[in-house]
Image: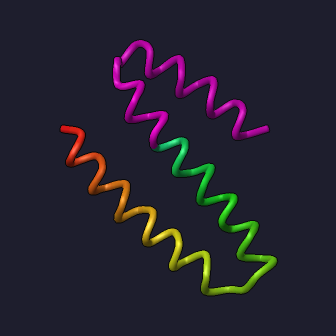
Amino acid sequence: MFFILGFIVIAILAIYVNVLIYLFAVLAILVIVSLIGLLGMIFGEYLPYILIGILVILFIRWIFRAR
């Protein structure tokens, strides 16, 4: 429920601020992190942190390359 409200609010704000791509990229990261957290509860404790770290590094490199 909170995710849906967050999507709506951030989408409306992004239309006004005109940084839609960055906000949706951040939302995608949040969704991926939450999914990895669910997988981590099933598969183990330390795997999700490693995957989140790799994803964050790749995302930061992608943002700097996109500029």
Question: Considering only vertical position in the picture, is 21 above or below 41?
Answer: above
Identity of the residue drawn at 28% across and 46% down: 63
* Total numbered badges shown on the rendered structure: 0
Identity of the residue drawn at 53% across and 22% down: 11
Question: Considering only vertical position in the picture, is 66 above or below 11?
Answer: below
Identity of the residue drawn at 43% across and 70% down: 54
- The quadrant of the rendering that contains the N terminus is top right
Quarter of image, res 20: top left
Across and down, in percent, residue 27 comes to: 54, 41
Region rendered in magenta: 1-25
Left or right placement of residue 32 versus residue 26 in this view: right
Left or right placement of residue 58 versus residue 2 in this view: left
Across and down, in percent, residue 2 comes to: 73, 40
Tell me the chief SS of the magenta region: helix
Judging depth in this view, the residue of 67 and 9 nearest the camera is 67
Colour mode?
A: rainbow
Question: Considering only vertical position in the picture, is 53 above or below 45?
Answer: above
Left or right placement of residue 42 versus residue 58 in this view: right
Across and down, in percent, residue 31 comes to: 62, 49
Quarter of image, res 9: top right
- The answer to if 7 sits in the magenta stretch is yes
Query: Outermost residue, top direction?
Result: 16
- The quadrant of the rendering that contains the C terminus is top left
